[in-house]
Image (spheres, helix red, strand yellow):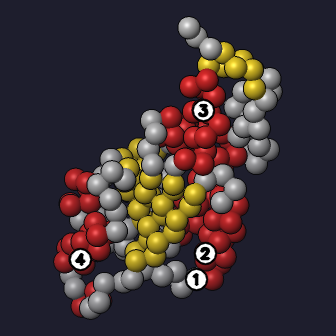
Amino acid sequence: MLQVYCVRLKVKILPAATCVRFEEFLTLYFSFAAMTIKLIYIGKTFQSFISEGCQEFESRLKRYTRLEVMVLPDVKGGGAMDGASLKKAEAALVLKNIKSEDWLILLDERGDSLGSVEFSKNLQDKMNKGLKTVVFLVGGAFGFDEQLYQRANEKLSFSKMTFSHQMIRLFLTEQIYRAYTILKNEPYHNE
């Protein structure tokens, strides 16, 4: 027997007082809070405007999802290393800080390029699949070691242009916030 529930949802994906199956209701109602977004950055940001911007969007995001921000320390002696050795050391540090079940997305110039609405749908798909933690990784100045490319579930590009690994933090945080406002049909994003 199919049970149908009429519910008033605060989540604005469906019109208020919509009839849905109970399983659909649970998915829609709880999917926003069930998934953790984890942002991993390598090295501190020394530019105050980037830090302040990230903090602003991080505080806004906390009303939609569990958010973890992890700033991994720069590799000791990294300034004396060649690019390949530094990437390998950074990869080892990253791999120690993620779980095997985490969904890893590398921010990489060769990744898929999505518009804001497509990106929000991509996040919703991950929620619908029941993923517990989605990790967005912003690498160091030299990019990623092959170990991270092999471990990654996705690669995401914000542009064909190259951005500093510092600037992309702010862009990423804002786009994740924008995605949640799109999913909740809130008036932040304009088409």
Which residue is nearer to you in this view: 97 or 72? 97
The structure residue drawn at horizontal position 26% and vertical position 91%, both measured from the top left corner, is 77
Can residue 16 be spotted in the picture?
yes
Q: Which mark is residue 89?
A: 4
Q: Is residue 40 left or right of residue 145?
A: right
In this figure, which residue is indicated by the disc labeled 3? 26
The answer to whether one can see residue 15 in this image is no
Say if 24 sits above or below 111 in the image. Answer: above
Which quadrant, please, contains the N terminus?
top right
Find numbered disc 2 in the image and state the secondary structure of the residue it sits on.
helix
- Residue labelled with disc 1: 47
For the point 43% across and 57% down, the residue is 135
Q: Residue at image x 65%, y 58%?
A: 61
Q: Vertically, is 62 above or below 55?
A: above
Amino acid type, label 3? Leu
**Which disc, if any, is residue 50?**
2
10 Å crowding of disc 1: few (<14), some (14-19), many (20+) = few
* Element marked by disc 3: helix
Q: Residue 97: x and y, percent?
A: 34, 68
Are the residues flagged by discs 3 and 1 in contact, CB closer than 8 Å?
no
